[in-house]
Amino acid sequence: MSSTPSAPISSGKGWIFVAVGLGTFMSALDTSIVNTILPLITRALGSPLVSTQWVVTTYLLVVSGFLLAFGRLGDLGGHKRLCLLGFAAFASGSALCALAGSVWGLVTSRALQALGAALLFANGPAILTRNFPPAQRGRILGLQATMTYLGLTLGPSLGGWLASAFGWRAVFSLNVPLGVAALVLGWRVIPADIPARRGEGFDAPGAALFIVGLVALLLGLNRGSAWGWGSAAVIGLILAAMALLALFVLWERRAASPLLDLGLFRRRLFSAALASAVMNYICTYTITFFLPFYLIQGRGLDSAQAGMILTAQPLVMALIAPISGALSDRIGSRLLATLGMLVLMVGLLALSRLGGKTPLPVVTALLVVTGLGIGLFTSPNTSTLMGAAPRQRQGVTAGILATARNTGMVLGVGLAGAIYNTLLAHQPPQAATLAAVPMVYGIGAVIALLAALTSAVRGDEAIEPSTTP
């Protein structure tokens, strides 16, 4: 292992990060900001909540379904081109959202916005990995993670202020100048990349199988609590998804230019880092989804008080991610990623002991612990995953990582939601919430331990000496 300090990031390359990071921040901000204004949208458009929820669900499904295809298109045709298209689509979709006159017009506009986000998620990390040397990869991906966490942190408070001061349409209008600025900056500073070698084509049948299969799976998991886990719709969606994704794997094994190079998964470093990432996101989103219920329904706090407490975790994540990323450039990522999941496990175990009279400063302190664990893990593990893939597969790898994040989110929310709704059927809300705490976070702690073990046995990547860019 090398202990050579990382070279400073040059100003030219720094502007590349600013362009990509602005897209990351904008997408993360929109993810968290819209959830806070759903009640306002429901009231303003006169739509039932069951319809308004599709504003969020459609965004998730479209982003997740197209990540892999857009990453592969970036590998084939150039990541800069698709990233710029992502900025344009996101800004255009945001403008249409702000102008929507009905809930279904808003849902349609959110789909366009989601296509833009998928283009950015699938090509942004590939641009950073291609333009920064391996000795700076952890640091730059850590800074990108910070942009994500800042967007998630600012979203609820900023969304609430904009909606109360200017109306819910202002929340979407905010993305338009941000998207245009990122588009202009990206066009000027991101270097054109060399497309894949000739002879490789885009695997349209594989892309169709993957998109339909993954959307069916995520829709079934996402709506399981609302429709009933034993309902014909949910069971049918999950069975159809399993069949389509199995067909996808069979097709990819025979395709001349596969959408997904299955050989990536034969690399233990890649597979283990990906499995750890999925488990990390499951744990993260059990906290993000369920702790507001504990604070508001279990403890009787209002949304403002709960929001202040919940801010602790993403703030710590934003502070730690670039530090752990830079450190992984020097000492490798396995120790940091494993330690991060162990810290997260300890935090989840402590959260599982929360009761109806736990002091609120203790709750905040535990969120600091979980934020520390997630921040320690994310940047080094992302650097490992991107570094384990060949240069001509960077877009697909970024798509795989983003798909892992969304899948982990749906599984984490589904797990916590299933436990909570099961108890809610037999107990009043406050009692059900407090009874669900040890189950949700106890299971989360077990998953975090499995992620730590997976990270520990994956092996070490080569640590390359720093070079001045």
Image (cartoon, rainbow, N blue to C red):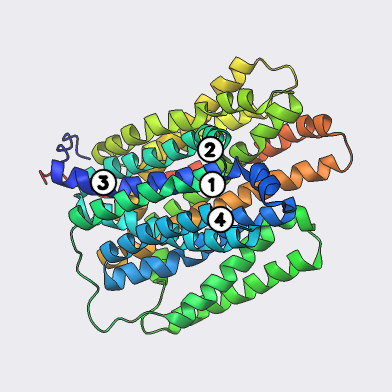
Cα–Cα gap, marks 4 and 2: 34 Å
Residue identified by numbered label 4: 407
Which is closer to the viewer, label 3 or label 4? 3
Q: Is residue 270 above or below residue 392?
A: above
Q: Is residue 284 above or below residue 54?
A: above
Q: Is residue 459 visible?
A: no
Of 283 and 141, which appears nearest the observer?
Answer: 141
24 left or right of 136? Answer: right
Cα–Cα gap, marks 1 and 3: 29 Å
Helix, strand or loop at mark 4:
helix
Cα–Cα gap, marks 3 and 4: 26 Å
Label 1 or label 4, whichever comes before in sequence order: 1
Cα–Cα gap, marks 2 and 3: 32 Å
Q: Position of residue 257 (x, y in %)?
A: 36, 81
Neighbourhood count class around disc 2 (C-alpha, 10 Å): few under 14, some 14–19, many 20 upward:
few
Quadrant of the drawing holding the N terminus: top left
Of 29 and 323, which appears nearest the observer?
Answer: 29
Label 2 or label 3, whichever comes before in sequence order: 3
Which is closer to the viewer, label 2 or label 3? 2
Residue identified by numbered label 2: 166
Which is closer to the viewer, label 1 or label 3? 1
Neighbourhood count class around disc 3 (C-alpha, 10 Å): few under 14, some 14–19, many 20 upward:
many
Residue identified by numbered label 1: 169
Residue identified by numbered label 3: 17
Helix, strand or loop at mark 2:
helix
Residue pictured at 67% horizontal, 74% vertical: 240
